[in-house]
Amino acid sequence: MNDPDGRPVLEDLAAEECLKLISDGGIGRVGFATPSGPMVLPVNYTMHDGTVLFRTAFGGPMDQDLSTGVPGVEFKIAFEVDSLDAAAREGWSVLVQGAAHRVTSEEELAAVQGTPVEPWAGGERRLYIRVTPTQITGRRITR
Amino acid sequence: MNDPDGRPVLEDLAAEECLKLISDGGIGRVGFATPSGPMVLPVNYTMHDGTVLFRTAFGGPMDQDLSTGVPGVEFKIAFEVDSLDAAAREGWSVLVQGAAHRVTSEEELAAVQGTPVEPWAGGERRLYIRVTPTQITGRRITR
């Protein structure tokens, strides 16, 4: 594993390629601050007009624990998507950092409610969270 | 998808079951605060004496950006592991929240250097990070 010739090669990805990799949606992991420390949760997401869109529950950790706690106020978020093969040690990961907000206005709700994003965990997850990227970085690992 | 009978069922997992699920190690995602906001990165981890152990690069985001920035000082971290089938909408996720520290003492380095945890991205990733769980939660989703 420590043979220099056998080591995985790490390559930085351009933002454009990152966006391509995550464009199909699927499962991502969202990281955010809470009063008791950082939190990371899996979500089912879709891309919508260059933003990351997912659904969660009112009163859940994405609703009540966020440091802002105020509808309409933006908060910083990290959103990670990857496709990694643990056995082959190959794959890629993309990190979107940006400003998230709860979708609360009638107008924006109408715009996103037609998008095909089902909440991962089921149940009454009617709170839409939308992330506007400020930075998109990614890495590809190959042998 | 919105048929009440077809919805996934969400079940909270006990800490003991969570530990069993993540005991084999593999790929996890670590979330932590940086001066510019939250960050989430994939890591290759192993469990070691009830702690989460992984390796990263000196001078990398896990080293320079952590709010403490001081070797030996603990910082709050979120560590997430999951096994999710996007198509079937089934699987589980475990969230470990706890205190992380850089492994710097000779004694602790000697204890962890024999563990089978290879850095995901290769290269000279000699900085060991160890997370002592303070809270372990998990969810299982079935249909």
Image: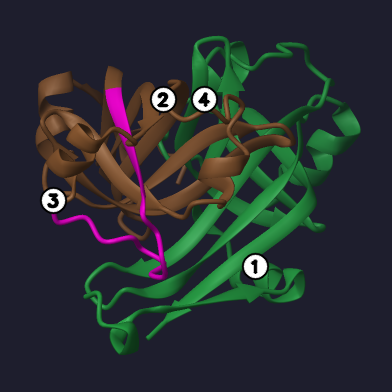
Chain colours: A green, B brown
Q: Residue A23 carries which label?
A: 1
Give residue A109's quadrant in the image: top right
Same chain for mark 3 and mark 4? The answer is: no
User: Which residue is labeled 4 in the image?
Assistant: A38
User: Which residue is labeled 2 in the image?
Assistant: B72
Of the residues tagged 1 and 3, which is closer to the observer?
3
Give me the residue at 63% from left, 41% from top: A78
- In the image, residue B80 sits, relative to residue A11, either above or below, namely above
Q: Position of residue B120 (x, y in %)?
A: 36, 63
Badge 1 vs badge 3, beta-carbon distance below 8 Å: no
- In the image, residue B95 sits, relative to residue B1, either above or below, namely above
Of the residues tagged 4 and 1, which is closer to the observer?
4
Of the residues tagged 4 and 2, which is closer to the observer?
2
Secondary structure under badge 1?
loop
Give me the residue at 66% from left, 69% from top: A18
Give the alpha-carbon distance from disc 4 to disc 2, as whole Å. 19 Å
Disc 3 residue type (three-letter): Thr
Badge 2 vs badge 1, beta-carbon distance below 8 Å: no
Give me the residue at 33% from left, 83% from top: A4
Of the residues tagged 3 and 4, which is closer to the observer?
3
Give the alpha-carbon distance from disc 3 to disc 4, as whole Å. 26 Å
Q: Nearer the viewer, residue B1 or A13?
A: A13
Residue B59, magenta (yes or no):
no
Secondary structure under badge 2?
loop
Which of the two labelled residues, at mark 3 and mark 2, occupies the earlier sequence position? 2
Give the alpha-carbon distance from disc 4 to disc 1, as whole Å. 26 Å
Disc 1 residue type (three-letter): Ser
Give the alpha-carbon distance from disc 2 to disc 1, as whole Å. 40 Å
Chain letter of disc 1 in the image: A
- In the image, residue A97 sits, relative to residue A60, either above or below, namely below
User: Which residue is labeled 3 in the image?
Assistant: B115
